Structures are given as C-alpha cells and as structure tokens.
Image: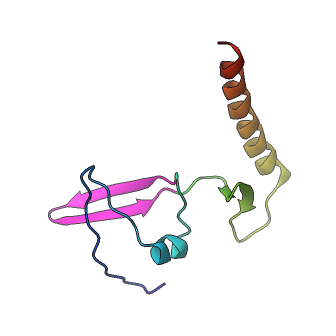
C-alpha cells in the first residue's frame, strides 16, 4: 500500500461510505471490524481498532496475526471466550 492514498467515495442515504477493497485488503479490514472516527475541522480520519488478541476470524477460520509465536494461554483464552459466547447464544435459543 502506498503511504498516502486518495480516492473519492460517496455517502449513501444512511450516512455510510464504502472503503475500497484494495485499501481494506491492505489494512486487513474485514466485515465487523471496528473503526475509530476522529474529526477535526473539515477532516475525518478513520483508524482500525485492533484487537488485543493476535487471533482474528477470517472466512470462518481463526488466523494468527502477529510477528512472534503465540502462547497456549492466549489461544485458550480466546477459545474460552468464543465457546462462552456460543453457549450463551445456544441457551437463549432453547429457553424460549
């Protein structure tokens, strides 16, 4: 990715803009990622909010994003969180 990239995007009726795919790919942005929006005068800046965990879901598979090794403590914590979320969702589904 170039250090500086300029493109034109259009605001839709709901106030949304689409970040072009080449830029999403270069920044490793995926659906559901959170962005920080900062405004100053006539400028708007979007920054990805990166998870503290080096594991991120990509196309339904958990992928390691980092430069070093990942420890079992980190993977176990992430898996426990995922399982807890899944279990909470399943309990709600069967308690109706």
Q: Is residue 80 left or right of residue 88?
A: right
The residue lying toward the viewer, choosing from 96 and 80, is 96
Location of residue 82 with respect to 46 vertically, above or below: above
Place residue 58 in its image quadrant.
bottom right
What residue is shown at x 53% (from left), y 56% (from top)?
A: 31
For the C terminus, give its image quadrant: top right
| Magenta span | 33-49
Check if residue 73 falls in the magenta segment: no
The outermost residue toward the top is 96
At a point 27% along the width and 76% down the height, the residue shown is: 8
Q: Is residue 45 above or below residue 84?
A: below
Magenta stretch: dominant SS? strand
Q: Indicate left or right for 80 with 52 as reference.
A: right
Which color scheme is applied?
rainbow
Tell me what residue is drawn at x 68 percent, y 25 percent.
88
Q: Nearer the viewer, residue 74 or 94?
A: 94
Residue 16 locus on image (x, y percent): 31, 55
Q: Position of residue 68 (x, y in %)?
A: 75, 69
Residue 36 sits inside the magenta stretch: yes
Residue extending furthest toward the right: 72
Q: At 82% across and 55% down in the image, what residue appears?
A: 71
């Amino acid at each position: 990715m170039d250090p500086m990239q300029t493109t034109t995007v259009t605001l839709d009726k709901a106030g949304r803009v689409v970040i072009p795919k080449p830029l999403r790919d270069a920044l490793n942005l995926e659906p559901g990622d959170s962005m920080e929006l900062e405004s100053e005068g006539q400028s708007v800046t979007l920054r990805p909010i990166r998870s503290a965990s080096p594991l991120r879901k990509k196309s339904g598979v958990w992928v390691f994003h980092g430069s070093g090794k990942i420890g079992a403590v980190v993977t176990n914590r992430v898996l426990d969180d995922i399982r807890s979320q899944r279990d909470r969702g399943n309990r709600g589904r069967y308690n109706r």
